Amino acid sequence: MIRVQSEDFDVGAELARLDGAGKNVGGICSFVGLVRETTGGEKLTAMTLEHYPGMTEKQLAEVEAEARSRWPLDEVLILHRFGRLVPGERIVLVAASSAHRDAAFNACRFLIDGLKIKAPFWKNEETTDGDSQWLEAIPAPPAPTR
Amino acid sequence: MKILYFAWLREKTGLGSEDATLPKNVKDVNALIHWLKGRSEGHAEAFSDLTHIRAAVNQEHVGLDHPVADGDEVAFFPPVTGG
């Protein structure tokens, strides 16, 4: 499941959707990404996440499909926020459930790493000195086409 | 063709998106960039360093040698920084 929204989310409530009777789920692995207090040694006031509506959902769906092709997963959740966020706020939640923990752990790692490479989000950081600038990506080759 | 700009490319071009009718000789992303640079000073500045630019055609990541055609949705943006 893919969700892109400006609103905050309740991690417990979201994860509770991934279990349930009748599913042969042995475990859920999740990762929550937060806005850090500092950037490059400077104190952050806020961060604004811009994204490309349409392409974001499409790319996240591809990341989910790729994870499902690699591991026997029951549920997959990728939830990513956009808009202005302050330090400490939640940005992203990824989770995977499976019959066994190895698949859940590996898929969870794959989901957050794949998202960082493929999903069209950009962070604009405001620092306490009044500056704002676009966060530069850690040098990496162009995003893979699949 | 619909062309979209994000992050500092949007700021430098002053446009979130624009519609364009391609000249016949524009057949790939590189040629499109070359043509767009002539549209305004902002465009020229936005596309001054291609090492910091990524492109998508019809919402898929592509290299700058990827073909383009009228009717495509083409987007330009810096390397992504989500998550």
Image (cartoon, helix red, strand yellow):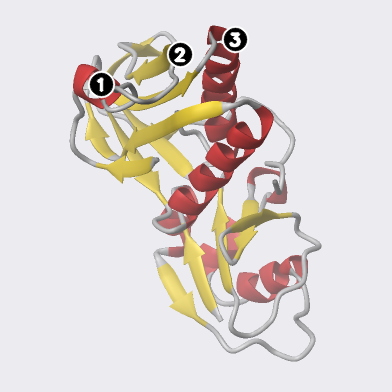
Q: Amino acid at mark 2?
A: Gly
Where A68 sits versus A13, above or below?
below
> Helix, strand, or loop for circle 1?
helix
Quadrant including the N terminus of chain A = top left
Q: Does residue B47 appear left or right of residue B80 in this picture? A: right
Residue in the picture at 25% in, 19% down: A11
Observer-side mark, 3 or 2, equals 3
Between discs 3 and 2, the one toward the N terminus: 2
> Helix, strand, or loop for circle 2?
loop
x then y, percent, for residue A109: 56, 18
Residue in the picture at 60% in, 9% down: A102
> Helix, strand, or loop for circle 3?
helix
Residue in the picture at 41% in, 16% down: A30
x then y, percent, for residue A29: 44, 14
Q: Are marks 1 and 2 in contact (CB under 8 Å)?
A: no
Between discs 3 and 1, the one toward the N terminus: 1
Q: Are marks 3 and 1 in contact (CB under 8 Å)?
A: no
CA neighbours of label 1 inside 10 A, class few (<14), some (14 to 19), many (20+): few
Q: Amino acid at mark 3?
A: Asp
Looking at the rendered structure, which numbered label has been put on residue A16? 1
Q: Amino acid at mark 1?
A: Ala
Tell me the CA gap for discs 3 and 1.
20 Å
Where A121 sits versus A28, above or below?
below
